[in-house]
Amino acid sequence: MTSTATSSSLDELCQAVRTLTDRAEIAEVCDRYAAHLDRNRGSDHWFDSVFTDDVHLVFPMGEYTGFEGFARFQQMARTTFARTHHISGAYAIELAGDEAEVRAHLTAFHVRDPAVPSAHFAIGGHYDARVVRTPAGWRIRSFTFDLVWNAGEAPGAKGHS
């Protein structure tokens, strides 16, 4: 093998490793988001480990911009549900340098009363996210959730808010 061929093979290998690393880190930030929603429900201190400070989020119940907007959304979730369980996966990641598009599945269970976990509100759907490489790692800049199905007693039903 010539020196040029060896260099070319090494460049290809480095690019493949970079692509695989980027994909793993992007999936990890999406998983981190779902985990924080459940594990750190009472705290807003994790936002910068998942989002850019100008994040734009779109949910069926509204749009939220920046950490302040997301904090309002989180406060609504905290006061409506005592516990949550989010599952995110099946990531389709399209890399474009220091940005990427992610399409994923999300299922979430929302429990109002921990003593009656069977009386939960469940949702499922897809989300599209734009993620960007920052000095601190990959972060979500925009997130749009597309609700496909729901089951159980939705917020606002039968006197619940």
Image (cartoon, rainbow, N blue to C red):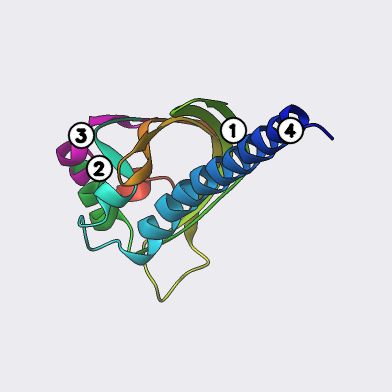
Q: Which mark is residue 73?
A: 2
Where residue 113 sits, quadrant-wise, is: bottom left
**What separation in Å lies between label 3 and label 4 (alpha carbons)?**
50 Å
Residue at 56% across / 46% down in the picture? 21
Q: Which label's residue is closer to the chain start, 4 or 1? A: 4
Provide the residue designation for mark 4.
3
- Residue 110 magenta-highlighted: no
Ranked by sequence position, the earlier of labels 3 and 4 is 4
Q: Secondary structure at mark 4?
A: helix
Spatial CA distance of label 2 from label 1 is 26 Å
Secondary-structure class at tag 3: helix
* Mark 3–mark 1 distance (CA, rounded to whole Å): 23 Å
Residue denoted by label 1: 93
Discs 2/3, front: 3
Q: Which comes sooner in the sequence, label 3 or label 1?
A: 3
Which quadrant holds the N terminus? top right
Give me the C-alpha separation between circle 4 and circle 1.
Answer: 34 Å
- What range of the chain is rendered magenta? 58-71
